[in-house]
Amino acid sequence: MKVPLWRVAFARSGDKGDTANVGLIAFTESVYPFLVDNVTADKVKQHFKDICRGSVDRYELPNLRALNFLLHESLGGGGTVSLMLDAQGKTFSAALLRMEVDVPEELVHEADEVSGWSERLE
């Protein structure tokens, strides 16, 4: 199923200077390996191509079922000097969750049960 990431994960974001920091956390243990295999630094870079001018680094945090992305040169110089509307990168998590991925149907349904989406989407 082609679905946005918000169906199988949640996210948080912030900043360190001109680098946005985005954490993507799987709703379930079985979704995490899927994220590792399918949400790469290159795909995230492509998703943020109009915003991120630098490289994207990805760090795996299996004990948290999470991936952490650093989007370098994406905040217009950082919070104290940027004229961007979101100079601290707080909306980057919502933007990443809009990225669509092909997820096995059983993982989507499992995540929907855990997240409560199954009740809201009916």
Image: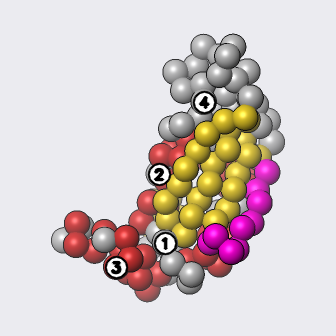
Q: Label 1 crowding class (10 Å Cα cut-off): few <14, some 14-19, many 20+?
A: many
Q: Tell me the residue that label 3 is attached to.
A: 113
Q: Say which amino acid is labelled 2.
A: Arg
Q: Say which amino acid is labelled 4.
A: Gln
Of mark 1 and mark 4, the one earlier in the sequence is 1
Q: What stretch is highlighted in magenta?
A: 57-65
Q: Say which amino acid is labelled 1.
A: Phe
Q: Tell me the residue that label 4 is attached to.
A: 88
Q: Tell me the residue that label 2 is attached to.
A: 98
Of mark 4 and mark 3, the one earlier in the sequence is 4
* Marks 3 & 2, CB-CB < 8 Å contact: no
Q: Which residue is drawn at 62% across and 72% down?
A: 65
Q: Residue 27 carries which label?
A: 1
Q: Say which amino acid is labelled 3.
A: Glu
Tell me if residue 40 comes above or below residue 104 in the rendering: above
Tell me if residue 96 comes above or below residue 54 in the rendering: below
Of mark 3 and mark 2, the one earlier in the sequence is 2
Of mark 4 and mark 2, the one earlier in the sequence is 4
